[in-house]
Image (spheres, grey):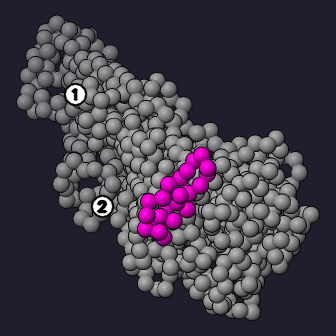
Amino acid sequence: MQDNSMDQENKDRKTLQPGANGQFKRRDILKGLAAVPAFGILGYGLFKHLGELKASRLDLLGGEDDIIPKGVPLVAGGQTLRLGFVGTGSRGRYLLKALGFLHPSRIDEYSEWAAINKYWKEYMDEFHAQDDLNVRITAVCDVFDKHALNGMEVGANLFRKGTGGEMGEAPRRYGTYQELCAASDVDAVVIVTPDHIHVPVVLEAARQGKHVYCEKPLSWTVEETFEVRKVVKDTGIVFQLGHQGRQTDSYQVARSLIERGVIGKISLIEVCTNRNDPNGAWVYDIDPEANAGNIDWKQFIGPAPWHDFSLERFFRWRCWWDYSTGLSGDLFTHEYDALNQILDLGIPRSAMATGGVYFYKDGRSVPDVLNMAFEYPERDLTLLYSATLASEKKRGKVIMGHDGYMELDETLLIKADPKSTRYAEEIRLGRIEPHMPLFSYVPGQDKVDAITSPTEKYFAERGLLYTYRDGKSYDTSHLHLREWINCIRKGDGTQPSCNIDQSFEEAITAHMGTISYHDGRKVYWDEANEEIV
Amino acid sequence: MEYTKGKLFWLVLLRMAIGWHFFYEGMVKVLNPAWTAKAYLMDSGGFMKPFFEWIAFNPSLLAVSDFVNAWGLALIGFFLLLGWLVRPAALGGMVLLGLYYLSHPPFPSIEYLFPVDGTYFVIDKTLVELVALGVVMSFPTAHIFGLDRLLKKS
C-alpha cells in the first residue's frame, strides 16, 4: 500500500496531478484553497470602493438622500369635475389626451402603429394606464368649426375606445367663450387659445366663478397682467398656468441640490432656444378645409388690431405681435418658469434685449433671433437667454456656480469647477475629477422616438413632455392638470405650483424683454410702484 | 491532461484573472442598489438592438436582467477563482460576454454614447475575454489548483 502510495505521489509530482487516495496533504490544502488570499484582497477592494462611493455621495448631498420628488397624488373621489375647453386645436387636443380623452380615430390609428412599433405601443399603453381623473368635458368652444366638432367627438370618448366603441355624451359647443363661461354645467375652464385671448377668457371665467387652467404665457399686454392678477385673487378661483415643466423631476431635484449648496454661489445662468425647422419656427400647416365660412374671424381677432381674413395669420398666429408674445412669451417663459421654480428668481431688476428677423423673412413681425439679459443685483446674478429659430446647435440650460455647474436637460448633470473652494480638498486628493459628472439624475425613459413632430422632440429633450415617477412614466401635462384638479377638489384655497403670483412674475419678466427689444433700450422694474420703466 | 509547470502557471493565472475581473464587476453591482443596466441596454447597437431595447423598456425584464447580470458576474467570478464548477461557470461567462458583445458590437458605422476605451474593429476586449474563457473551459486546472482538488480527493 505504502509503495503504491509513494509511486502515486511520484507520479503526481511528475505530471502535477493530485493524489486520489482521499487524504489531504498540506500541499492539497494550499493548492485547493489557492483563491482564498485573492478573495481577501478583493474584499478589501470592495470595502474601499463602497466607502468612497458612500462618502462622496453623502458629502455631495449634505448627508441627506431623499431628494427624489414624491409626485402628485391622485385625488379622484367625489363629484365629477365638469370642464369647458376654450380652444381645441392641436395643443387643446394634447391637453385633452393628458386628461384621458383621445379621438376614436386617433386611437385606431395609434393602435395600428402600436402593433408594429414598440414606441407607439408604449405610448398607447401609457395612455390606457393613465389614471382616471374623474372629469368630463361638458363644453367646447373654438372659432374654427372643424376643431370645435373634433373637440366634441374627443370629449365624448369617455371610455378611451376606438371607432365603433361605446361613447358618452358629447360636450356642448358654444359659439363664444362668454357663453361657455356662463354655462351652469361648467365647473372649470381650460384655456388653450392664442396668447392675445388668454386674459379675456381668464377674466370672464373668473368673474363667473370658474376655476382656470390657462396655457402660457399668462398675458399679451402689460396692463392686462395687473388686471388678471387682481381678478383671480379677488374671486379666489383655483388658477394654474400651463407650465408643465413644474412637474419635471429633474427641476425639483435641481432645486434640492442647489439648496444644499452643491454648486456654490450662482453668478450666471444661461438658457437657450435652439430650433431649426419650419414647425419650430411656427410655420404650421394650413388646413385645406379652413376658410372664411368656417372660421369666426371677428372672434379670433378679439382685442387685436383689425386685419382682413388671413389663413396664414390664423394658423401661424405666433409669427405676429398682433396675437403672439414672440420668443420671449412663447419659449423663454418655459426656461424662465423652470428657473423660477428652482431658484425663486422673481422679477428681474432690469432687462436688455436685442435680436431681429434674420432668417424667416416671411412677413412675420416677431424676431426669430432674440438675446436677452436679465439682471438680479440683489441675488448677484445674471440670467441670459439666447434664441434662434434657425440653428439646432444644442445649447443647454446651465446654472453656473463657483463650485460647480449644473446642466439641465432631460437629465441633470453637475460637474465640479476646477477652481472650486468647496471641493478643493477632494480635487487635490483626486476624489473628485473636475469636468467629470459629480451627480447625474436621469428622470426616466427616452421617449423621444415616440414623439412625432420636431417641436415635440424639442420639448421632450427639454424634459417638458415626459417625466418619471415611482418607476412609471407620466406625461407632465397630465400631472400639471392633475395638480390643478386636486386643488379644486380640496376646496380649501390651496393653489397649484404655477399659481397667479408665479404667473405674474413670468409675464412681467417676458414683457420686460419684449419692451426692451421694441424700444432698443434697457428697461427696469420699479418694484415699489410695480411698474416697468 | 498533462501540463508543464509553465503551462499550468499561465492557465491558472488566466482562470483566476478572469475570475477576479468577473467577481469584482459583479460584486460592485450587487452592492450598489442603484445600479441598473438600463442605460447600457438603451445604448445598444447592431442587429440585436431591438432585443436589448425591449429588455430596457420592460421593467420586469429589466429587473431580471439586472439581477442575473450582477449575481451572474459575481458567482461566475467566485467559481472561477475558487476552482469549482469551472466548466459551467466559464460557459455562463461566455454567454454573458457574448451578450455584452452583441449589444455593443464594434462594427464601423455604429456609434455609441458609452465611451470606448480603445479602437476596435470586429474584435474588442469583450470578445478576447470570451475567447480566453473558452481556453479556461477547455484546459481544466481546478483539479490541480482549486477547490476541485480537495473535492475530488474526499
Q: Is residue A58 a member of the stretch shown in magenta?
A: no
Residue ID for mark 1: A428
Circle 1 — which element? Answer: helix
Q: Residue at x 13, y 11 (%)?
A: A6
Query: For the view shown, which residue lies furthest in the top direction?
Result: A2
Q: Is residue A445 toward the left or the right of residue A496 in the image?
A: left
Is A197 located above or below residue B153 in the figure? below
Q: Residues within 10 Å of mark 1 (few under 14, many from 20)?
A: few
Q: Are marks 2 and 1 on the same chain?
A: no
Q: Is residue A407 toward the left or the right of residue A487 in the image?
A: left
- Residue type at tag 1: Arg
Q: Nearer the viewer, residue A179 or A5?
A: A179
Residue ID for mark 2: B111
- Please state the horizontal and vertical placement of residue A213, each as a whole percent of the image: 72, 58
Would residue B13 be seen by someone viewing this image from the given angle?
A: yes
| Distance from the alpha carbon under mark 2 to that under mark 1 | 35 Å
Q: Nearer the viewer, residue A192 or A434?
A: A192
The segment highlighted magenta reads A511-533
Q: Is residue A532 a member of the stretch shown in magenta?
A: yes
**What's the chain of the residue with tag 1?**
A
- Please state the horizontal and vertical placement of residue A303, each as a whole percent of the image: 70, 76
Is A194 located above or below residue A407 in the figure? below
Q: In the image, which is nearer the foreground, mark 2 or mark 1?
A: 1
Q: Residue at x 62, y 62 (%)?
A: A222
Is B11 located above or below residue A35 in the figure? below
- Please state the horizontal and vertical placement of residue A242, each as a whole percent of the image: 64, 58
